[in-house]
Amino acid sequence: MTEAAAKPRSNLLMRVLTAVVGAPIILGLLYFGPPDAFFGLTVLANAIAAWELFSMSHPDDTPSRAFGVLVSIAIGAIVYFLGADARVLVTTFAVVPFLGLFFTLFRLGSMTTAGLRAMALSFGPLYVGLPLGLMAAMRRDVGGNDGAGFVVLSLFFAWLADTGGYFAGRFLGKHKLYEAVSPKKTVEGAIGGLVAAALGAVLAHFWFLRSLPLVHGIVLAVIAGAAGQAGDLGESLLKRSTGVKDSGAILPGHGGILDRIDALLVTVTVTYLYVAWMR
């Protein structure tokens, strides 16, 4: 076996082993732990992913990275503990963009990158903190085990789509999807990802989320799966524009936490909006 052929196989093995270790922890907290324990897991993911994000936008500015992480955690906590109060949410969304701008004025640095850094601090905490706060709130607020079930459904949309896209792209991929942003992704892989997401919805309906109408689940899978792939491309855009290959190295075979949840940040938001508006 050539070195080039061995590397993808080794990477796939590491990804599988990481999932085997991580999945029981996530599912255990979802179905058997108290809601606040799962919220604690999202806070940990929030902190690491935000640090990775701001390490890309602020590579030489530790105080700005720390500030961005704190704001991201605060947003997740506000959504989880106070999200039922519309006034609190409106105030949060109105204030956060200005915090990023004002903090950049305080730590100006290079004028050529100041605008981009300000926008990163304004958008980044909402990008990471809001979806993770919504995921914890969805686990707690939807009746019975359905809250945990909808969280798992959003995981299916992100991670089954990623797996389906990986294999469809590897064995069938011929047409590039968006070469300027992610050279390895193909149209065939994207279609395979949507099929895998739809199969995840079917599995959820018949196994652990019987309250989800099958037609709703399939439509939701296509929408969330496509949006999740766009989220994956969006994070690739951030990495390529800052010259970073992986957001981090904390997960063997996966890179950083942000690399692993880039699609999930979108799929959990779409799933939460479905639950909020359609149930």
Image (cartoon, grey):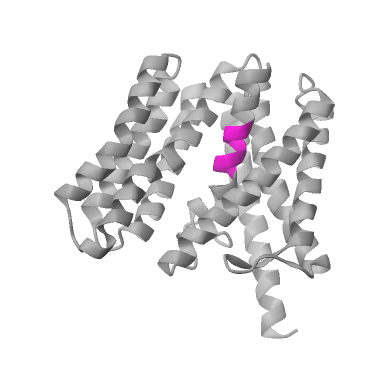
> Quadrant of the rendered structure where residue 219 is?
top right
Magenta stretch, main secondary structure class: helix
The image position of residue 230, as x and y in percent, is: 61, 50
Q: Residue furthest left?
A: 106
The stretch in magenta equals 264-270
Q: Residue furthest bottom?
A: 2
Query: Residue at 83% of width from left, 27% of height from top?
Result: 214
Query: Residue at 76% of width from left, 68% of height from top?
Result: 175
Q: Is residue 3 magenta?
A: no
Tell me: 246 left or right of 63.
right
Tell me: 208 left or right of 234.
right
Residue 249 can be seen, yes or no: no
User: Is 112 placed above or below 70 here?
Assistant: below
The image position of residue 117, as x and y in percent, is: 30, 54
Q: Quadrant of the N terminus?
A: bottom right
Query: Residue at 35% of width from left, 53% of height from top?
Result: 54
Residue 182 can be seen, yes or no: yes
The residue nearer to you, when weighing 117 against 131, is 117
Tell me: 142 left or right of 37.
right
The image position of residue 178, as x and y in percent, is: 64, 64
The residue nearer to you, when weighing 169 against 105, is 105
Q: Quadrant of the C terminus?
A: top right
User: Is 233 placed above or below 103 here?
Assistant: below
Report the number of numbered marks: 0
Query: Residue at 64% of width from left, 67% of height from top?
Result: 11
The image position of residue 246, as x and y in percent, is: 49, 64
> Quadrant of the rendered structure where residue 110 is?
bottom left
